[in-house]
Amino acid sequence: MARPAGGGDSAEVDDAARARADQDVRGDQGARSDPTPRGGPGLPATRDDRAPRGAHTEAALLDHHGDVEARGLRDFAVNVAVPRPPAFLGEAMSSAIDGLAAYPDPGPATARLAAHLGVPEERVLITNGAAEAFHLVARARGWRRPVVVHPQFTEPEAALRAAGYVPERHVLPGPDFALDADALNGDTSTCGRITGETPGRTADDRTGRVPDDEDRHRHAADQHAADRHAGHDVGTDSAADLVVLGNPTNPTSRLHPVAEVLRLRRPGRLVLVDEAFLDVVPREQDTALRHAASGDGLVVVRSLTKTFGLAGVRAGFLVAAPEVVAACAAVQPHWSVNSLALAAVEAVCSAQGVAHTAEVVERLREARPHLVDGLTSLGFEVTVPAAGPFVLARHPGAARLRLALREQGIAVRRGDTFPGLDESYVRIAVRERAETDVLLAALTRLLSAELDVDESESPVTDDRSAATPHTAGRDENLDRPDGVEHPTPQPPAPHDDREDR
């Protein structure tokens, strides 16, 4: 059952995670009693692992995003597919500057986008990035039992928590992280249930599922009382009424068959599908957008951030039945999407936008195998097939390798802030071949120098409390290659910037 966020153990990280977060927050701010820098004996201190604000809470882990890790470094941490907006988008936004004195009007951009998608206008809502869409859905109804499928982008769960819910979690098992609708719907006898736990790191997390009839009967009485207290309509069905998943999923890059996604539908349930990276899948294979537009119990969220390099502008949208769109619009702040973003939305719907997307799809098709093959040859276990502009890779020494890469000016995204993953995982963005070669060469040097990644000392484990602390340093003899200059890691800004949609 969904519970108000902020109380009880469900909002606390486990002891090991809390201790690590404490150390990360202190970092090199002078609060350490140990004079040895966090990077290890004889190495400069690093600031990359500093936990987000409020490190003692579950929400702090959910709020950690890759942009904080990438600042000032060669960036393989942020999953934006292009380094800058294409020229035609820059021109469109520049042309909109003269109209900035007027309040933004989303009407023309909505009409253009709806026509581009081939759906009625009343089934489309433009949002301030996909992140706003998650918050709008979280507040659109009084959800009884929201469930989030992990590992995935953490903002949907963070949005639900901000709205007062502690959602249940269904954690897909590695190494392939494939969606099994039967298991998630509770149709198999081996499934259990996870409610509001800390980020999943144990085998038990694989048994989390959407509640079934047995759960409905067990919790009917207390759910009835909770709903009445909250002022919600009280019904007899307390099964999950909101299920959230990504496709293709961040950080696993796994593309789930749309037929499997559609099997999650139930009467009275809304299935939210985060398709922020679906536009880089050839022919938009396995999109649920048409089903969402038909009112089939789905809402699809899309982003223009990644494929068009618009993270700083914030442009996204959702597609759903008119009543869902209206409910989301009712809780959306006035003028939340600025005029430059609206100009970008219209430009994306042009022939130039279509051509740019096709170019990105082809570039990823060529560049992704080079990254996967290179990582595999170095002993990484890569989740395949990968469909997004990033890959998820596992290595027993991933935490130490990640810190050592930072010393060489290279950032990759830590994986252990995603529920269901531990410190042996990193997410790595797909870049141009030459850029990828820089990363692979750095990893080769570190591994050949026998970086302290002995599996006997840091075993791959799903138990977060037993995982090697991510504050571990590198061997004191592993100095940088002579004569190579590297950028100095920059500290995170004091506010909570997020690598959201």
Image: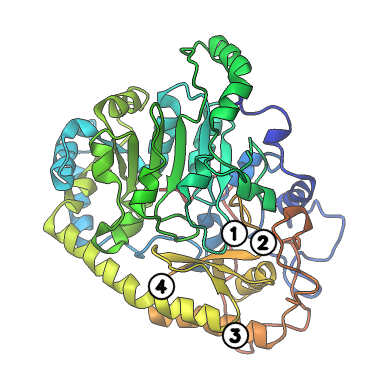
* SS assignment at label 2: loop
Q: CA distance from mark 2 to mark 4?
A: 23 Å
* Residue type at the position of mark 2: Glu
Q: Which residue position is annotated with label 1?
A: 415
* Residue type at the position of mark 1: Gly
Q: Which residue position is annotated with label 2?
A: 423
* SS assignment at label 1: loop
* SS assignment at label 4: loop
Q: CA distance from mark 3 to mark 4?
A: 18 Å
Return the disc, 3 or 4, that comes first in the chain's sequence: 4
Q: Which residue position is annotated with label 4?
A: 431
Task: Say whether marks 1 and 4 touch (CB < 8 Å).
Answer: no
Up the image or down, 368 lies above or below 7; here it is below
* Residue type at the position of mark 4: Arg
Task: Say whether marks 3 and 2 touch (CB < 8 Å).
Answer: no
Q: Which residue position is annotated with label 3?
A: 444
Q: Nearer the viewer, residue 213 or 129?
A: 213
* Nearer the camera: disc 1 or disc 4: 1
Return the disc, 1 or 3, that comes first in the chain's sequence: 1
Q: CA distance from mark 1 to mark 2?
A: 6 Å
Q: CA distance from mark 1 to mark 3?
A: 21 Å
